[in-house]
Amino acid sequence: MSEKKIRIPVERYEWPDERRLKRQRRLRTLFITIGLIVAFGFGYVVRTAMTPLTTSVTNDFERFEAIFNVLKDEWYFSKDLINPEDKLINDAVNGMIESSGDPHTVYMSADEVQMFAESIDRGFVGIGVSYFDNNGTFIIERVFIDSPAERAGVQPGDIIYSVDGVSTVGLTSDEIVDRVRGEENSIVTIEFLRGQAIVSLDITRGIIANTAFGKMLENDVAFLEIYQFGTSTASEVKQYLEVFKQANAKKIIIDLRDNGGGYLTSLEDVGSMFIPKDGILIKQELTSGDALVSKSTGNIILPFEEILILVNENTASAAEVFAIAVEENIGSTIVGVLTYGKGTVQQQRPFSDGSALKYTVAEWFSPLGNKINGVGITPDVIVAQHEVMQESFTLLEENESYGYDQVHASIRDAQVALDFLDYDVDRTDGYFSESTLTTIQAYLNDNNYIELEAVVNKALLDTLRADVVREWHLNQDKDLQLQKALELAYE
């Protein structure tokens, strides 16, 4: 049996262009293949007998227009297209862009332009949570600070059970988003599965624009998490820095994990709050070959004695720019694992219909001239998270079940999750031993999961994953990278 895989941790954010390219690649390949077969097969022979062999063209654009008109008006399969003109133009544009080999240059529809802006600014009307789709089970991963969801009592690890009386069984992730979002100040009633209990909450929808979060940790150490570099990020960070100043913070941990980047203007504004005036933030090599250097304005609100920066494999683009700029300018310490390595700069060319072309205009380098694109940033202190946050997890069908003396990848998933939850696990090789049975029974008894069997099936894995997410968010000690940063801060 083939094994489908899913990852538990937050993945690096994929821009709408990347998702769209992946989604269209197979269909476009099939479309082109079929087109080639038709063009060079029987149809070609018949057509040449019915029409002139050549059409006069004097330049490339005339040739394109001639091909477009033939496909639009005479191509047999154009009758199957809802809007053949738009389809042909969009395919031509996307084909031209895809052949460039640059995954970050893409044409976006008006809807995708809006989604792109929302993804950076995290601005929309909703309840303020993020969740992941675990094969049809929707598990809350993060509850945004001061969001409608937090005020209503939603917790990480909750499973979305129903929305306004409609069960989530069989719904897609997009369908759930459509039901949860709505007009500002309207109320949505959501039932959550928390452990074995159903919790019903009435949540008043509001504008969600959280790109940063901060708090004081122990002693004089502040913690600042930047989710994205959006239009409001600088003002949000400034507010937190003012709070840290009032609290007499001396050191700060800046969390850039899973930060996919954002606007360079935002990066420059935020970077100027940590890097002295005229310190180099970024070097860009433009299409012309010329260099463009951005420098800090020195808008430092609180000069920290020490700055530690957390990164992971999903730290990308502007987040990488910020991390390496702070390190090379003032000697901060970067903790975590190798970053993503996106070192190109894009800008948008909008069109009157709301669509836009997002295209690469430059490659950026660190203040000292180090290349990042395709290379990433190697942390000063390398720390990986627990296996449960790193490895793929097997998706089981409803009727799949594995028990004593069997071997399966899903059994290893359960063993790794139980180890993360501090249960006594003798092995993590996927063999269901007597000790594994005893450990699963202890887990079920401790949590009063009386409806679950002591076997590895979809129900057990869903419950384990939910508990892993809840433990991750509620128990700071589980974050090995953060703990290492704290250790360095307290030295």
Image (cartoon, rainbow, N blue to C red):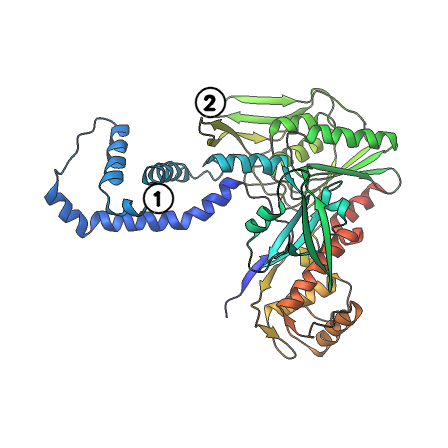
| Residue 49, image x, y percentages | 10, 44
**Residue 30 in the image: above or below residue 297:** below
Q: Nearer the viewer, residue 91 or 360?
A: 91
Q: Nearer the viewer, residue 195 or 376?
A: 195
**Residue 484 in the image: above or below residue 402:** above
Mark sitting on residue 288: 2
Question: Circle 1 — which element?
Answer: loop
Question: Circle 2 — which element?
Answer: loop
Q: Nearer the viewer, residue 134 or 338?
A: 134
Residue depicted at 27% across the width and 32% down the height = 65
Q: Earlier in the sequence, mark 2 or mark 1?
A: 1
Mark sitting on residue 82: 1
Left or right of 75? Residue 196 is right
Mark sitting on residue 91: none
- Which quadrant of the figure has residue 293? top right
| Residue 50, image x, y percentages | 11, 43
- Which quadrant of the figure has residue 466? bottom right
Counting other residues with Cα less than 10 Å from the Cα at mark 1, is it few (<14), some (14-19), or many (20 or more)?
few
- Which quadrant of the figure has residue 167? bottom right
Counting other residues with Cα less than 10 Å from the Cα at mark 2, is it few (<14), some (14-19), or many (20 or more)?
few
Q: CA distance from mark 2 to mark 1?
A: 42 Å
**Amino acid, disc 2:** Ser
Q: How many discs appear?
A: 2
Residue depicted at 79% across the width and 48% down the height = 483
| Residue 395, image x, y percentages | 57, 64
**Amino acid, disc 1:** Ile
Q: Residue furthest left?
A: 49
| Residue 40, image x, y percentages | 21, 49
Note whether residue 294 is visible. Answer: yes
Image quadrant holding the C terminus, namely: top right
